[in-house]
Amino acid sequence: MPGKSMILILLILLPVLGSGAASPAGEPDKSSWTVGILVMDGIYNTELVGPYDVFSHAKPFRVVTIAPAKRELKTAEGIRFLPDHDFTDHPPIDILVIPSFVDYQEQIRQEEIVGWIRDRGEKADWVLSHCWGAFYLAAAGFLDGREAMTFPPDIDKFAAMFPKVRTRKGFRFVRDGKFITSAGGVASYESPLYLVRILAGDEAARRVARGLVIPDWRLEKIPYLER
């Protein structure tokens, strides 16, 4: 049995020894990660529900929806809902998620939206986009010189609009640094699961996948690019 003095030393050292711990991928541990999903009229269901499902069923993640103004919104498919926050009252964002919207070609020219994405994306630890969400990240300047992708039928248009982006084809999602761009659709579940795996471990990601009835989810089965 250790003496009282040894126990006291261990109690003093434990917080020090535990500080600076890292996740399996070397990312700093946090007590929680706040996921902020941009929402506006015309958001596509899958790009909202996919990341919301994955992160809300994982620990230690907290999910909030953020709109330019706090009012009732309607998805492209017709679901009506209220956002949790607007651009003025949301909490700090650790993981920023930019889905796709019907009016993306008009919205990427609106400084209120692109400026907010630029400001929050610079401060966030991670930034995810789904489908046309990559157009917003490119408009904010985040993807210059980086590898990225978008909705497969519009990859050529994306490359023409943003020639500084190293546009890639043939993947479900692409990670370059803290930026993850995906094809949308089913990839709106896969890239969040990938991030859960990085931050909380493989078993945590597979547990969420099992809960969402995605059988035997394994990262190595998914065509993705990482750099």
Image (cartoon, grey):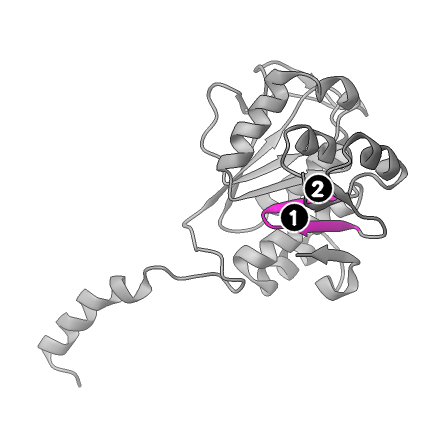
Q: Nearer the viewer, residue 154 or 87?
A: 154
Image quarter in which the N terminus is found: bottom left
Q: Which residues are magenta?
A: 172-182
Q: Nearer the viewer, residue 160 or 116?
A: 160
The residue shown at (15%, 72%) is 9
The residue carrying mark 1 is 192
- SS for callout 2: helix
Across and down, in percent, residue 144 comes to: 67, 38
201 falls in the magenta region: no
- SS for callout 1: helix
Measured Cα–Cα span from mark 2 to mark 1: 8 Å
Instruction: Specify the amino acid type for callout 2.
Output: Gly
Q: Nearer the viewer, mark 2 or mark 1?
A: 1
Tell me if residue 89 comes above or below residue 224 in the rendering.
above
Lower position in the chain sequence, tag 2 or tag 1:
2
Q: Nearer the viewer, residue 195 or 56?
A: 195
Q: Is residue 211 left or right of residue 62?
A: right
Across and down, in percent, residue 187 comes to: 76, 47
Q: Is residue 173 left or right of residue 92?
A: right
Image quarter in which the C terminus is found: bottom right
Dot 1: few (<14), some (14–19), or many (≥20) neighbours within 10 Å? many
The residue carrying mark 2 is 50
